[in-house]
Amino acid sequence: MNKTIAIVGSGVAGLRAAIELLNNGYEVLVFSKDKLSYCNTDKAQGGIAVVLNPLDSLDKHIEDTLKAGAGLCRKEAVEILVKEGPERVRELINWGANFDRNDKGELDFTKEAAHSTNRILHALGDATGHEIEQTLIKKLKTFSRVEIFEYRMLLRILTENNQIYGVEFLNLKTEEYEVYKIDAAILATGGYAAIYKNTTNPQITTGDGIATTFLAGATLEDMEFVQFHPTALKRYNAPQFLLSESMRGEGAVLINDRGEEFMRKYHRLGDLAPRDVVARSIIFEMKERGIDKVYLDATKMGADFVRKRFPTIYNECLKYGLDISKEAIPVSPAAHYTMGGIKTDVKARTSIKGLFAAGEVACNGVHGANRLASNSMLEGLVFGKRAAESATEFLKSYQPINIEVRKPNTINCNKLALKRRIEDLKETIWNKLGVVRRMKEMEEILNCSWALFLKHNLPYNCPEGITLRNMALIASAIAYAGILRKSSVGAHYCVDTPHSYDNKRHISFNIKDLEKNL
């Protein structure tokens, strides 16, 4: 076909999109910021929510998703997710994905917070993401018309008359710029949770795709909605390892420093309340008790069950001297997932012609103000395929742009100084745009992060400079959206506007809108 499509991102959405395009006969370039498998998908412990259980129904899954989204889900997007999900998961199984099964050899469905029934599939207990990622990579490598470029950091989306014609990267091995002429692109670069000091995400998830697309003129939506996972490991010299929500689904409970269960104090569902409620409740409990952590107690499950059901978590904690079958685990909230992103329709189309987005980088309304647990993997599969279908449709009638792509002149970095600024900004973002927010603090960080962006919006020849630029721009967008949101809803909680009355409006804007209001 002699048409080239770039896939930027190598998680579930990007790989599913690539496979679809390769099936359709296109030349596909897959770009990954790290090695191909190093992404949020591969690290995901939780499962994939899908209606394959005979005791479940599509209507139940739709209703649960809409409830979790706190009035801000787009029903059409939710219905597509739930109705197309089973076929996408069956494909995965046909491609070799091994999900856990019960003693009868049937798929083993479990329940997680805010789900009304058992519909979560897992692989190897708590290594679902790894199984899905490896299955998709194996399938991808059966095609010959794909080129894989690892260690490429997205720098710019090149457009003319609001149509994409190229993508620009920093080669992280050589620290040289690379520019690729393309016919269309699908962004699947993930979210922006790693701009926070406390995060469960790999450090590469700093919103690169969202920032570069925003700079190219695309519309963003619902950037204020950042999901904080309630239970990340809080232990000296240990990473903020995620303690899967499925642990509470299986009976683990949150306790304070006195050993008291406290979640019923904050919500009728107790430990199985939606994530945003649990995260805030932990923050409130820590403040009330004057402590910096609470505990997740899984000891009543039994040692054999814990080791079998949560082998990754068990072994990871054991590395740091914690036997979770015998002692409670110190935890605190951390940034985990971002509902906001590049505004798309249900066909994954952005406001830039020829540019599509799927997965966490996109905001199509499927999660609303708060993502339902284990819906993200399904979203990547469903909308990754849809993005590829839309790109295929676009290329049938598009007019190519004949512009020569050129490398820009670059400037040298003071890496040490930039790294310090990055760490300082992460702490500021955590303090002012964290689980509990205040209007004055959002206004403060909007002004300082925008000034930081203007100072560092330069063609640096190092990842630190580009990361600082992107983080400052994303922080500005979160704060701007949070200020415009005149109430607390879902994952956005502001103490100055605690009531949830402004829950039918999506906050959408482009960079010109932001500039005009500063």
Image: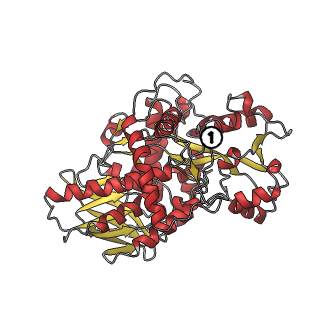
As displayed, is residue 27 above or below residue 52? below
Which residue is depicted at the point 46% across and 73% down? 138
Q: Which residue is more in the foreground, 134 or 256? A: 134
Q: Judge whether residue 381 can be spotted in this image.
A: yes
Indicate left or right for 126 with 139 as reference: right
Q: Is residue 216 above or below residue 517?
A: below
Looking at the figure, which quarter contains the C terminus?
top left
99 with respect to 346 (left or right)? right
Q: Residues within 10 Å of mark 1 (few under 14, many from 20)?
A: many
Check the picture and name the quadrant holding the N terminus: bottom left
Residue 117, percent from left and from top: 59, 40
Q: Residue furthest front?
A: 104
What's the colour scheme?
secondary structure
How many marks the image carries: the answer is 1
Name the residue located 44 percent from the left edge and 32 percent from the top edge. Answer: 72
Image location (x, y in percent) of residue 323: 82, 59
Image vertical order of residue 480 relative to residue 474, above or below: above
Of residues 169 and 344, the one nearer the viewer is: 344
Q: Position of residue 492 (x, y in %)?
A: 53, 34
Q: Decide: is 179 above or below 86.
A: below
What amino acid is labelled 1 in the image?
A: Ala
**Tag 1 residue:** 113
Which corner quadrant of the image does residue 419 belong to? bottom right
- What residue is shown at x 42% (from left), y 55% (from top)? 88
State the SS at label 1. loop
Using the image as rendered, state which of residue 49 and residue 28 is in the foreground: 49
